[in-house]
Structure formats: structure tokens, C-alpha cells
Amino acid sequence: MVCTVLLSELIPGLPEEIGFECLTRFHYSSHRIAARVCRRWQELLQSREFYYHRKQTGHTQKAACLVQLLNTGSNPDGSKPVSPPTYGITVFDPISGIWDRVDPVPKYPDGLPLFCQITSSEGKLVVMGGWDPTSYDPVRDVFIYEFTTQRWRQGKQMPGTRSFFAAGVIDGRVIVAGGHDENKNALSTAWEYDVSHDEWTELTRMSQERDECQGMVIGSEFWVVSGYRTDNQGGFEGSAEVMDLGTGKWSRAEEAWKVSQCPRSCVGVGKEKKLFCWADRDSAIRVGVCAVPLGERTFVSGSAYQGGPQGFFLVDEQSGKFKSIDVPVEFSGPIGNLGQNAEQPRLFDVRSTCGTETCKIGYQWISGSQIAALLSIRLPTPCQTENSSYNMV
């Protein structure tokens, strides 16, 4: 059935159906320019019906969206950068092999909030929470990036301050759970954000608080993997909480994860919903592993050893074979040091590159007063994890 917003003479001289199918086959990166041709094209390309038509006919694709350190490299004299770390969003298209960077969020033109969460929904990218990159205060901001228009808009703020929480998306709804509040107390609460209606709804609490947990949608279930309680910081648990998205009820899955292992950005799903850590799958990604499922393939990055070169791969879900990805220099150059004890930070090192005991962020550029303020903030557990998502564009 043809989209109801189909307008006459989309392409002069061609039948309506042919003109419509021509626009359907446009790559998402061309939509912003194509929308300037005329108002008819703009209304069509930016409509939800057109997006769903492209999706139903197989003309959308999954792209890996990753938060990347921007101020990379060294100073002319070979010294390390002294400016604060800044982050932006990088998009990798596995079909074309193209790497690109999303425009900065207008409110934070010099870099995303530190430790923000990114998720995706129906051709949109959603950025939530994090810390102000200047003051390090937790923020409740929500921003939505439209891939069709390639523009940002600000959404309704998160109901409360929440850092290092689990997040997942299904049917245009972003679910967040766990993490910790501004007083560093681990949380058991959960909320749902409707991207289209820009509204938050409180959900049933989990059975226990879970800080630094990992969220993922498996079928019709939202999983919150591992995490730890306020009184046991860094003591990652082996259990998971599972919400049935139909009933909204939680259940527990015991022995779902390895005890004491940080789950951030490295959880994979095997047969019969059995979870595994991507770092255990290949010796090339033992350290700083990040995985983004892309349907029949998974984008994976990591190093063979601490301080080693970063590898980038696409893994076939059926065969399990790793295929190396060529990365442009501007997306794989040397990275400024973010961790006091880190030998080499990671390309998509969102949370931090950590030491063995206490994570510290770039003391070489933090003033004395900022250090005093930062010492009162509970930083993430040492695990060298990344923030990533995929988006259907």
C-alpha cells in the first residue's frame, strides 16, 4: 500500500508510483539535501509514514552510533593535550563502510555531556543524562536527533537525576532503569520515555537497586543485567532483572552473568537468551570491548591487551567469524589520555579509561578546586566500557 502522504508529480514526467519508489531508495544521508528540493519532498521525506514504508520495503538499515573522543592526537611539541576531553557521536554504516560524525548538540556545542546514554528509536537518536562537561554536575537533559532532517531538538527532561543507568528501546519507547542519583545512591526505579509524545511514565520498580547495569531488549523483554547495590560498590552481581514489556512486570534471572564482571557495553546474547561477554569471544578484543548488534552482524571493537592497538570488526552472527574493518585516520588516530593509570585510552571510550582501583579523569587539565569537587563524585567502576547504540536509518 502506498504511503498516504504521496503527493502528485513528485518527479515531473514520471508516474506517481515510480517517483515515490525513487525517493524511497534515497540513502538516509541524502534526505536533508533532498528535502530542500520542494515542500512536497520535504513533507514526504520527513513523515513517519514514509519512514515506516522504507522500513517495510527493506530500504532502511542499521548503523552503529558511538560516542567518540574528539580532541585526539598530540600537541605540536609531542606533549599530551591539556584541554578537557570532548565527545561527539560517530556513525558507522556497515553496508557502505562510511564513517561520519553527527552535528553537535546545540546546548553543548563543545562536546556531549560526559557519560551520557545514547539509544535509538524509529530513525531518531536519543541522548539522555550525563554530566555537564564543564561543571561535572549531573544533568537531566534529553535530546533527539532526527536523521532525516539531521537536526537536534530538546525533549522533556528526565524525571530525576540518574547516572550510569540501563536503557533500551522498543516501539518508540525508551526504558531506563537503575543507575544512581545525585547522592550516589543506587536506584531500583524505572521510567519509560515516549519519544513521539515527549512524555515520561513511571514503571514498576525492580526487586533491587542496580548501579552501572546494562540494559538490552531481547524479544518482548527488557533486561537489566548485573549492577551493584549502594552498600556494595563495584560488587557486580550475577543476576538480572527482566521486564515483560506486555505486562510491565519484573522477574529475576539468577546466574545470568558472571559475578564481579562489569557488563557495560560488552553483553552479547546467544542461543536461548544466554548472555555472554564479547571479551571472551576472541583474543583480539580482550580489553576495552564494545559491541553493537546490527541484525545479522555485530560491530565489535577492542584491544588484545592493555595499551594495544584498537581493532574494529564485523562479526557474522551465524558463523561467528570476525571481519576486520578499515577505519579512516580521523576516526582512529591516537587518543588523549583520560585516565591517570591508563596506558592507552580507547577510541570509543565514553565512560573512561580506568586504573585498577579508582577511576580518575584527566587530572592534567583539572584545576585544584575542580579536583576537590571531583573527589566527592563517585566515578564509574574500572572497566573501560563504551556507550553505543544502533539506529535504523
Image (spheres, helix red, strand yellow):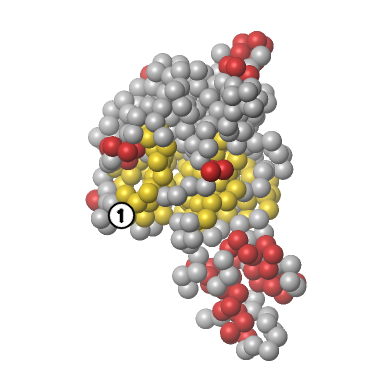
Among the 4 quarters of the image, the one containing residue 11: bottom right
Measuring from the top left, give residue 253's x and y in whole percent: 28, 39
Looking at the image, which is closer to me, 26 or 376?
26
Q: Quadrant of the C terminus?
A: bottom right
Residue appearing at x 63%, y 86% in the figure: 16
Residue appearing at x 27%, y 32% in the figure: 258
Q: Is residue 7 left or right of residue 272?
A: right
Q: Which residue is mark 1?
A: 317
Relative to 106, residue 85 above or below:
above
Looking at the image, which is closer to me, 203 or 265?
265
Among the 4 quarters of the image, the one containing residue 47: bottom right
- Where disc 1 sits, the SS reads loop
Amino acid type for the residue under numbered disc 1: Glu
Residue appearing at x 64%, y 68% in the figure: 45
Outermost residue toward the front in this view: 77
Relative to 292, residue 345 above or below:
above
Characterize the local packing of mark 1: few (<14), some (14-19) or many (20 or more) Cα atoms within 10 angstroms: some
Q: Is residue 130 left or right of residue 36?
A: left
Kindly tell me whether residue 203 is visible in this rendering: no
**How many numbered circles does the render carry?**
1
Measuring from the top left, give residue 265's x and y in whole percent: 41, 38
Relative to 384, residue 292 above or below:
below
Measuring from the top left, give residue 103's x and y in whole percent: 66, 47
Kindly tell me whether residue 104 is visible in this rendering: yes
Among the 4 quarters of the image, the one containing residue 241: top left
Residue appearing at x 39%, y 37% in the figure: 302
Measuring from the top left, give residue 370's x and y in whole percent: 65, 15
